[in-house]
């Protein structure tokens, strides 16, 4: 196990980057081989047709039937689970000692819900911000803030 190695997961619902710092005074570096991007079109772009219709029991009014699940939302949750599984595997292998999560609030909640036991032990802080498209040198002040 790396006694200090710190990882920072910078993610949103479609992109993920991992930054690494081997010790407290070392600069952050990006693990480019760990970067992930998925394609998750909006729900209406994923549907095959218009939602079904239902007639009102009293009168001639018709209403659209809401789908039981939102494919866009389900893809976000599946991506959070994938990231959590990858973090759990890396934690079990001893690749990092502490973790910082940086994500927009809704996706950060999905990530926290999906984290495994080993990852939760190593989670030191989280930051509710969307910084996925920010350059590495611009990210560092945000990471030290957390």
Image (cartoon, rainbow, N blue to C red):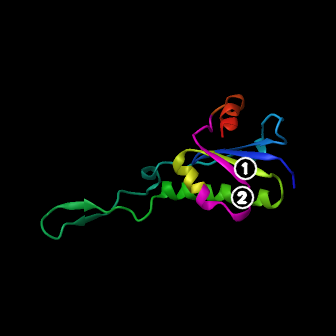
Rendered position, 46 above or below 30: below
Mark 2 Cα shell of 10 Å, populated few (<14), some (14-19), many (≥20): many
Look at 70% across and 36% down and name the residue there. Answer: 144
Q: In which quarter of the image is residue 49?
A: bottom left
Q: Return the residue nearer the eye: 87 or 76.
A: 87
User: Element under label 2?
Assistant: helix
Percent coordinates x, y for residue 57 in the rendering:
17, 70
Q: Do the residues labelled 1 and 2 touch (CB within 8 Å)?
A: yes
* Residue, disc 1: 99
- Residue shown at the point (87%, 56%) measured from the top left: 1
**Which residue is outermost to the top?**
137
Q: Judge whether 83 appears above or below 23 on screen.
A: below
Q: Up-down: is 115 above or below 6? A: below
Q: In which quarter of the image is residue 48?
A: bottom left
**Circle 1 residues within 10 Å: few <14, some 14–19, many ≥20:** many
Query: Where does label 2 land, which residue?
Result: 119
Q: Nearer the viewer, residue 85 or 103?
A: 103
Left or right for 74, reference 38: left
Q: In the image, 10: left or right of 68?
A: right
At x 35% / y 61%, what residue is drawn?
Answer: 66
Q: Residue 140 carries which label?
A: none
Which quarter of the figure is the C terminus placed in?
A: top right
Q: What stretch is highlighted in magenta?
A: 112-133
Is 120 magenta? The answer is: yes
In the rendered image, the residue lying farthest to the left is: 59
Where is residue 95 shown, x and y percent of the image? 83, 53
Query: Which badge, 1 or 2, comes first in the chain's sequence?
Result: 1
């Amino acid at each position: 196990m790396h006694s200090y190695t710190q990882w920072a997961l910078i993610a949103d619902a479609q992109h993920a980057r991992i930054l690494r710092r081997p010790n407290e005074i070392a600069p952050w570096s990006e693990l480019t081989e760990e970067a992930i991007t998925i394609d998750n079109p909006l729900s209406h772009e994923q549907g095959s047709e218009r939602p079904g219709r239902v007639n009102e029991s009293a009168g001639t009014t018709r209403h659209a039937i809401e789908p039981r699940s939102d494919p866009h939302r389900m893809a976000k949750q599946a991506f959070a689970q994938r990231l959590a599984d990858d973090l759990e595997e890396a934690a079990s292998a001893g690749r990092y000692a502490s973790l910082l999560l940086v994500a927009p609030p809704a996706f950060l909640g999905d990530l926290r819900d999906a984290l495994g036991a080993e990852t939760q032990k190593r989670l030191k802080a989280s930051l509710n911000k969307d910084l996925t498209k920010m350059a590495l040198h611009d990210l560092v002040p945000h990471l030290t803030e957390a």
